[in-house]
Image: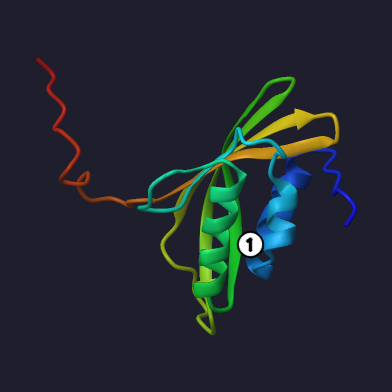
Amino acid sequence: MSESIFPTPEAAEAAFYAAFEARSLDAMMAVWASDDSIACIHPMAAPLNGRAAVAAGWHSMFEAAGQFRVQVELAQEIRAAAQVIRIVREYLVIGQETEPRPPILATNIYRKEAGGWRMVLHHASPLQVGGTPPSRTPPVVLH
């Protein structure tokens, strides 16, 4: 299998979400950096550190998932010469549903390597729209 080349962080991100929708572990892992300095945090789950753990996490998710589509909206981007942080809103449309589920906020970090741009972190968390913060968040003390 030839190594995929991602000339931009945007190309790596497009490949990441295409692999996500296709539930293709090979395509998914082709986006990630080849060393063990990677991490993935799925919503409400513990961190997965290193290639083996990240691959196992995606494998489990793909085995359990049905048909879905992901719509991605860029919320913020922080660019440096060899690293890009992209904060996005993910909207999942499950099965035959016509409307997306509530958004998931994700931080995707890409690192420039010899073979192009690779993902080093994906951290996804449910986005609370309105309402009060989760109860485990300590109240803000202003005095």
The N terminus: image quadrant: bottom right
Q: Residue at x 45, y 54 (%)?
A: 104
Q: Nearest the camera: 9 or 33?
A: 33
Q: Nearest the camera: 43 or 102?
A: 43
Q: Measured from the top left, where is residue 92 in percent x and y?
A: 52, 66
The single residue placed furthest to the top in the displayed view is 143
Q: Nearest the camera: 143 or 42?
A: 42
Q: Quadrant of residue 76?
A: top right
- Residue 100 versus residue 14 in the image, above or below: below
Position of 143 with respect to 62 (left or right) is left
Q: Measured from the top left, where is residue 64 in percent x and y?
A: 49, 74
The single residue placed furthest to the bottom in the displayed view is 96
Q: Residue at x 64, y 67 (%)?
A: 21
- Residue 52 versus residue 97 in the image, above or below: above
Does dot 1 land on a helix, a strand or a loop?
helix
Q: Is residue 14 visible?
A: no
Position of 78 with respect to 97 (left or right) is right
Q: Measured from the top left, where is residue 99 in percent x and y?
A: 49, 74
Position of 36 with respect to 11 (left or right) is left
Position of 117 with respect to 38 (left or right) is right
Q: Quadrant of residue 20?
A: bottom right
Q: Is residue 42 visible?
A: yes
Q: Residue at x 51, y 65 (%)?
A: 61
Q: Nearest the camera: 92 or 12?
A: 12
The C terminus: image quadrant: top left
**Which amino acid, by three-letter code, is at mark 1?**
Phe
**Where does label 1 land, which residue?**
20
